[in-house]
Image (cartoon, rainbow, N blue to C red):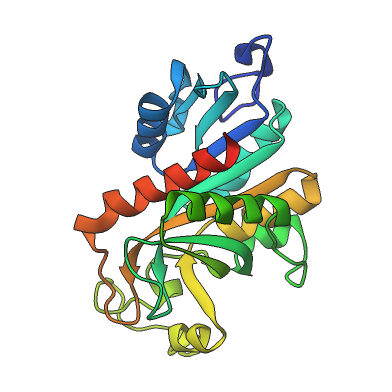
Amino acid sequence: MPYHIGFSQKDLGTNPPEIALLSGEPERSRHIAHTYLQNVKLLSEYRGLHSYLGYSPNQKPILIATSGMGAPSLSIVVNELIQVGIKKIIRIGTCGSIQPHVLVGSVVISQAALCRQGTANDIAPPEYPAVADPFLTVALAQAAQKLDIPYHVGITASVDSFYEGQERVQSSANPNLQSWLLGITKQYLHLNILNYEMETGTLFKMASVYGFTAGCVCGVIAQRTQSEDIIAQDKNLAVERAIKVVLESIS
């Protein structure tokens, strides 16, 4: 049994899932499993990495897993998910917009990531591309179109820290950024990067190196061209839209 996720391939039964939907929050994992799947079975709650086995309405087995916050935790969970037979991983996350036209409540489908993550450098060199599976990316975009959900496809800035790395100073205990981080959000805006988040670059590099399929959909919960704040009242809408896009894409 893999040490961290708390379940083995035997726990997945005679018709094991090949798809895992990955969220940072255990609460989101629980919500997806119990709201959208049938015959749900709790696999593990070890270390707060809640995992569930459930079935779609057409009886496709799906694993719902929790990655925790940040790339180091995600890399452990993803490694062990591959060990138990998972072949496709889609991250369902949240993010902050870097572009004025990417509005809170919409979703971002990441086609690639600017990967500024130490964990990813342990997987492959910094210059190794962090890219999503192109066919899965198209399927996610088509699902958003079908559901009439506002979406954007583009490049994500995947960084290791929520405060310093995303140029937060007003809401941080540390208002003194290193000089190279000053103005980084504006630089990314001019590079046409859509959003900030903390896991996708490492997921994409792992997918290419390990040989599995990966994609990512994030609900936009902050507009960083205006404020550092998370727009809490719109979080549920953004997250539900991201979940529905992913489930439609694999139905």
- Percent x, y of residue 242: 43, 49
Left or right: residue 166 compared with residue 110? left
Camera sees residue 178: no
Q: Quadrant of the C terminus?
A: top right
Q: Residue at x 66, y 48 (%)?
A: 214
**Mark count:** 0
Left or right: residue 86 compared with residue 198? right
Q: Residue at x 37, y 69 (%)?
A: 163
Q: Name, please, the residue furthest toward the top.
A: 14
The image shows residue 146, relative to residue 60, as above or below, that is below
Q: Quadrant of the N terminus?
A: top right
Q: Residue at x 46, y 33 (%)?
A: 49
- Percent x, y of residue 117: 60, 65
Left or right: residue 11 compared with residue 170? right
Q: Write down the quadrant of residue 10 in the picture.
A: top right
User: Which one is nearer the viewer's eye here, 156 or 228?
Assistant: 156
User: Which one is nearer the viewer's eye here, 211 or 149?
Assistant: 149
The image shows residue 59, relative to residue 140, as above or below, that is above
Camera sees residue 101: yes
- Percent x, y of residue 11: 60, 13
Left or right: residue 40 compared with residue 139? left
Q: Residue at x 48, y 84 (%)?
A: 189
- Percent x, y of residue 27: 34, 36
User: Which one is nearer the viewer's eye here, 145 or 51?
Assistant: 145
